[in-house]
Image: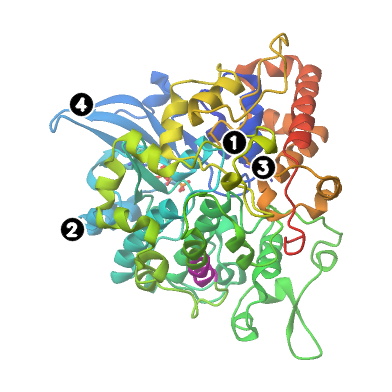
Amino acid sequence: MICTQYLKHCYGPSKGMKLTSHFSCCFHLFCFSILRDNMGSRVSKASTSPSEMDPVQLPRGYEVLEVLGEGYFGKVLKCWKKDIKQTVAVKIPKCFENDTVNEVSMLRRFKHLKLHQHNIVEFMDCFQTRYGKAIVLEVLDITLGDYLGKTSFAPMLVSDIRSIIQQMGTAFEALKGIGVIHADLHLHNIMIENHQTQPFRVKLIDFGVAMSRSEASQGKLLQPMAFRSPEILLGCPFSEAIDMWSLGCLMFIMICGKLPFSGRSEYEILRSIIDLLGQPEDLVLSTGLQTKKYFNWTESSSWELKTSFEYFRCHLSTVKDHKLQSLDDLKKMRLEENNGSEAAERDQCIELLKAMLKTGEDERITPREVLTHLFITKDYPNNGAEKSETSHRKMMRPKAAVLSKRRPACPTTAPPSTLHTSHIPPAGVILVQPATAENILLLEGQGSEVSGRSYIDKTSGCSAFTSPFSSEDSTPSPTFLPSGVVILVRPATAQRSMLGDQESAVSFQSGLYEASVSLVTDVESGMESSICEASGSCENTGAENEPGKKKNFLRRVFSWMRKTFRPCVPSVDGPA
Ligand SMILES: Nc1ncnc2c1ncn2[C@@H]1O[C@H](COP(=O)(O)OP(=O)(O)OP(=O)(O)O)[C@@H](O)[C@H]1O
């Protein structure tokens, strides 16, 4: 089921995201569609009309400035708090049922323990409204989901992933220390403090369903479905370890821009978990209140997952976001051309991921162990200099310096013969110029009116991308790869072309290609237009008036992408 609210959030006029062109709207629809199911619905900075901004009378001391976001339970407004002369975020319950008593008492406790120093949002105050207590918090910038959206879910650099995981490890270690389970971790409950000046300084928000360990009674339905741990899916006893599972799911998205487990139902999520990680131990399954719903007890005295026919009474096509056969396949990724230690770093990164995504909660890594894991603590040659700086200083480094350090030598899609040999990636590896915060900064100034070509030119500082359309073509050049993602493609040989034509053989590394193919499929099946209808997100583009033109345009664009970004399929080891 497509989450309409999530889509609204994705396509609403949020800060720094100008979706004025029809193409960029559809491109983003496609990019976000990979994360569409049950990832936590959001509306960010959805509206600033005064009637919507002020759903309740705020006390006199507050002046409403804008809407910062909206979740299932609350609307968050940016306000000027006159007595302290500071902007604050005010979370207002939407209706009577959305009682904030639990959240307020949790946040009071956190304030007392100064947990804002442990990457948890700072609670400032609260006041009574018509629907319950409004919560006054420090203002944060954008959610991790919004950030990834700005980069079209491009894989992140390992060093940036490390920074976020280390901070979340700190937050969850603090919560575990006081026996609190967050129970609602998703892409929009991690917020970046300031994505322009401190792109990877993050805080954990939303304690609406947080609970103490003693309240963790078996059978509770918690966590967004795509991030739901096996113990919650199965109705087993659970603990703080459920948050580590969700953090593992987020880490997977940061690593490769895809959902680890996808599906439209709990059964499908469970099946997706089993496909990638194997079945939980029988000992775990035997404790689940829901186990019999999903599994059969066989004659050989073991649990066996029901077939989709047994479960749904019909056959079901699998919905998968990736083609990995094991998490180890992620070790083959490379993003940084000049980072000699990337392989070693990525190995450790994936080892940590595997430790977070253990199906048995007893085996799963604890926050403290995350903080002492080699991926977090080891001095890798390439980031030795960075490690000696505090993360704050690292993030405050002047933009130009960061750019020159991070950006690999000018990537290009020029004919292979003109490529310097040192720029040619090893067989089967696609180098993706990661969407760094700096790229996004550059992009933000440009908006979607800029043509695809100049967009990329300005971003990467080199001619990396050539529009498929001649300058005479009245169709605006597409703003693909808006995040500055550049793909280095090996020359298409006859053999590779054959492989490339078999979509099922497309390797993981060609995920971006694969994604574009899936959009073509989506568009062709009319799914994209139904997403627009469901979300109402295309209203402003005027695109709904010209469905045929829109469809043709997208077909042309993606057939060009298909031909141009011929995937590099590893000859032997790429996951099918
Ligand atoms: N301190 C803050 N500063 C800026 N924006 C915020 C802040 N807190 C929340 N937001 C924005 O408001 C959105 C909703 O906030 P929050 O997650 O607390 O609401 P919720 O209704 O409890 O959500 P959920 O549906 O996950 O239960 C966030 O995703 C974010 O975009």
Which residue position holds label 4? 60
Residue 463 in the figure: left or right of residue 530: left
Residue 122 falls left or right of residue 433:
left
Q: Label 4 vs label 3: CA separation?
A: 40 Å
Residue 467 location, quadrant? top right
**Magenta stretch encompasses residue 538:** no
* Mark 4 and mark 1: Cα distance apart in space: 35 Å
Label 3 vs 1, first from the N-terminus: 3
Q: Amino acid at mark 3?
A: Ile
Left or right side of 213 for 217: right
Does the residue at mark 3 contact the one at mark 1 (Cβ under 8 Å)? Answer: yes
Q: Quadrant of the C terminus?
A: bottom right
Residue located at (64% from left, 54% from top): 426
Predominant secondary structure, magenta span: helix
Taking 52 as reference, is 138 left or right? Answer: left
Decide: few, some or many residues near mark 1? Use Cα within 10 Å; few <14, some 14-19, many ≥20.
many
Q: Determine crowd level at label 4: few under 14, some 14-19, many 20+ residues with C-alpha closer than 10 A.
A: few
